[in-house]
Amino acid sequence: MSQAARALDRIFRAESGAVLATLIRLLGDFQLAEDALQDALTAALESWPRGGLPISPAAWLTTTARRKALDRLRHLKIAETKKATWALLKRWEQEAEQGVDAADLSPVADDQLRLIFTCCHPALSREAQVALTLQTLGGLSVTEIARAFLVSEAAIAQRLARAKQKILRAGIPYEVPARESLATRLEAVLGVLYLVFNEGYLATTGRQLVRGDLVEDALRLARSLAELLPTEPEPRGLLALLLLHDARREARTDEAGDLVLLEDQDRSKWNQARIQEGLRLVEDALRERKAGPYQIQAAIAAVHAEAPTAADTDWRQIVLLYQALLVHEPTPIVELNRAVAISFASGPGRGLSALEAIEAIGNLESYAPVHLARADMLHRLGRVEEARECYRRALACADNEQVRRFITRRLAE
Amino acid sequence: MKYALLIYESEKIWASLSKEEQGQIYNEYMSLTEEFAKSGKMKGCEPLDPTSTATTIRVRSGKVSTQDGPFAETKEQLGGVYVIDAKDLDEAIAWAAKIPAARTGSIEIRPVMKFD
């Protein structure tokens, strides 16, 4: 790719989500908006290198795409179904003749918010929500999404087509939800972004531990969501959580690509800029006194981030935070994390009792982290043989190759 | 947009309720139907008799075969339908959530097919 093409690519990535969101509102049709945007991007590739960058690339793309949509509709000639759109476009044409300011066509932030709520509508499957969000707001191609999720391109293309079909036919609205349903609808949006991040960060399948691109995409989307909803603290909580996790990216694996536990990580490798931004965001969000699960998880990550060494970690604080998290997410996995925190705050014996209480209720027999946690506590208590047995059980149900190698190393010690 | 709200509920659970409990739910349906009608959004509503009264037929090679009972044995059975005119899916969901069976059974929301 030439330097100019790379620069254009960067602009397209940054702007296309916003432009598409506005086009979908203007045209009322996902597919037409996407096709028109593609046309506009092609036109930009031809005209920008010659004529120089427009003052507002986003406004240029929106205006051009709108004109391209009109061209497309003219060729389609499906009179009945496109009548409404047609009338709309006619009106724009007249506006253009009367010299309406091009700045009026700049992408509107609200459109992006509408689009993200549409893409993450609970009437769509989680897989569809993720694919749609990455394509429309993240600017990822079908090929990129397929590669990131290790699914065939045909499968992703079909998933996207079905989802767009459902949005159209089932009448999924293109709107920011009303106040009374905003909280539950926001949960779905945050869930999608967190899933995209984790898919990149944890990479539960395959050999690679971190799929960096998805991490970057999730961060970018979380950042814009936090900006679009400044009155809601949870998006800021999510962004803080992602930043604080990602700050440890370099320290999470060693030269051989093996997993390094939090307590063994070289903390000088932690990205201080990300940590500082994450800490600032979580403090800022918590000040609004509307603590939600993402803010609490970010607060937990913040306690780790603030400890100069693993031994300095304020585990009592972490136990309290997990207790608060349980109110929002009463899941065995949160209970497990709380038990681990207890084992560090009050000793592995206490941790083991907490763990036994969960195992009695939860169905976690095939969940590797439970066996790993138990193994670690038993090991610290000097009950080496029992610990080995737990490591073996963990190995039987771990599917990430790095985690498997980690367990194998422990067993060899 | 027109939507059909298909009401699925366990006939077994319904049959196990006392007369008073059934009466209470009937009244809820009556007032909901009234609310629907007043809003001007309702296009139709039909409660159905239980599946014990159902007859399923199929035509194969031009021959009608008739069978006692519903088309499939399921945990919840189709018990009725509202057809409404709503702005979008969110409005349809809000109406569907008011149907008493939503608390014990399920409501399937289906857009009515448009011919264009």
Image (cartoon, rainbow, N blue to C red):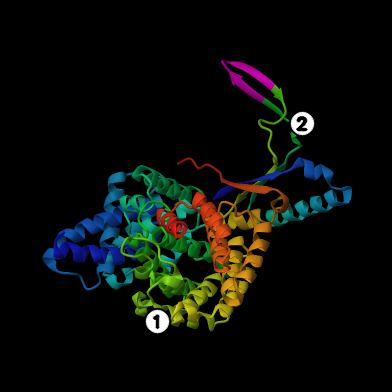
In the displayed structure image, the side of residue A40 where residue A220 appears, left or right: right
Closer to the camera in the image, A337 or A19: A337
Q: Regarding mark 2 in the picture, which secondary structure is present there?
A: helix
Q: Which residue is the extreme one toward the right?
A: B19
Residue A309 visible? The answer is yes
Tell me residue B102's x, y (percent): 69, 52
Q: Amino acid at mark 2?
A: Thr
Tell me residue A38's x, y (percent): 27, 55
Which residue was labeled with disc 1?
A276
**Disc 1 chain ID:** A
The total of numbered circles placed on residues is 2
Is residue B61 rendered magenta in the image? yes
Which residue was labeled with disc 2?
B53
Residue A370 visible? The answer is no
Viewport quadrant of the C terminus of chain B: top left
Q: CA distance from mark 2 to mark 1?
A: 69 Å
Q: Residue at x 51, y 50 (%)?
A: A397
Instruction: State whether residue A287 is above or below residue A350.
Output: below
Instruction: State whether residue A137 is above or below residue B108.
Output: below
**Disc 2 chain ID:** B
Closer to the camera in the image, A226 or B8: A226
Instruction: State whether residue A11 is above or below residue A166.
Output: below
Closer to the camera in the image, A200 or A251: A251
> Which stretch is magenta?
B57-66
**Foreground: disc 2 or disc 1:** 1
Q: Regarding mark 1 in the picture, which secondary structure is present there?
A: helix
Tell me residue A167's x, y (percent): 47, 51
The image quarter containing residue B60 is top right
Is residue A230 rendered magenta in the image? no
In the displayed structure image, the side of residue A234 where residue A326 appears, left or right: right
Tell me residue A80's x, y (percent): 40, 45
